[in-house]
Image: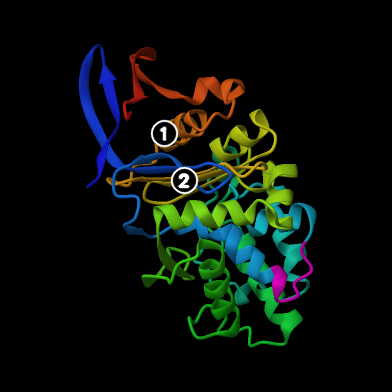
Amino acid sequence: MPELLAEVTRNGFVESLHHGSVVGLHPDGSAGVSVGAVDDAVLPRSCMKPFQALACLSAGASLAGPALAIAAGSHTGENRHVELVMKLLGGLPVGLLRCPASWPEDEETRQRMTEPSRVRMNCSGKHAAMLAACVAARWPTQTYLEPTHPLQQMVLRTVEELSGETVAHTAVDGCGAPVYALSLRGLARAMQGLVRTPVAGAMRKYPEFVGGTGHVNTVVMQLLPGVVAKGGAEGVLVLATTAGHAVAVKVLDGNPRATTAIGLTALAALGFDVSPAKEHLSVPVLGGGQVVGEVRVVFQ
């Protein structure tokens, strides 16, 4: 059963509750944190992106440095992100991107836009990397999102090999790509495998292309060098260290506001020093522009 992970207080009044599950694995694979239904399947959503990027790399896509980081990330649609996506496309028409048109998440950039676009969508780096992989492997580009496409089958194998599990369900993510259900424990196990790959190295070195200016995943990686942080829609988050600590979080109501605090608390429980990011161990609640409460972690 899901457990209470965090509560929202306002002037001493408990206003909202966030239930869910969190698992934290030591480098040897043993569970140091296990709260809630950690063996139930969840959809990783954008936490799948690092594994999708790894499959693209395995298929022959020329991905390195910032390009590999953005392939594994959910960028905020800034100009530097768009420039890199266009470079990844390598002359392919933008219309080949099958992600939907979207407004950029970066507010300053959004204010300058007159209409949404596919390259501004937070998943466009992943989609451009998938197209690059198809070109490298001489696979069809028009159908690259079909679950039966060779690239998506490679993603499936990558996820199953790293997690040590058989995928429980295949769904369609918000960007149109297949997303594979795993247990939360399996997702954390897969992250332990990922930290030894070039994908994790690129994410650690170029966190500004995993998220963007002010994005919490980017900020956490900047504050905790060596940590990989990747969030996904519907309250999912993964964290992993170079030493092999790994955390996976699922908040059942889908709200992400507590996921970073929950994940960092679990990482600290594994013995990893998160003090440089201590301001993210809770989230302030405002009233009239003043702090009147907090989103605080309550699991034991």
Q: For this rendering, which residue is in front, 137 or 183? A: 183
**SS category of the residue bearing label 1:** helix
**SS category of the residue bearing label 2:** strand
Residue 61 covered by magenta stretch: yes
Residue at 57 percent of width and 80 percent of height? 144
Which numbered dot is residue 237? 2
Residue 49 covered by magenta stretch: no
Report the Cα–Cα distance between label 1 and label 2.
9 Å
Residue at 39 percent of width and 35 percent of height? 257
Decide which of tag 1 and tag 2 comes sooner along the chain: 2
Q: Is residue 77 left or right of residue 86?
A: left
Q: Is residue 53 left or right of residue 259?
A: right
Q: Which residues are magenta?
A: 57-63
Residue at 64 percent of width and 63 percent of height? 53
Dividing the picture into quadrants, the one containing residue 5 is top left
Q: Are marks 1 and 2 in contact (CB under 8 Å)?
A: yes
Vertically, is 110 above or below 297? below
Q: For this rendering, which residue is in front, 248 or 88? A: 248
Residue at 68 percent of width and 51 percent of height? 200
Image coordinates for residue 108, horizontal then vertical, percent: 59, 38
Vertically, is 279 above or below 190? above
Q: Look at the image and tell me in which quarter the C terminus lies.
A: top left
Vertically, is 69 above or below 245? below
Q: Amino acid at mark 2?
A: Leu
| Residue topped by disc 1 | 262
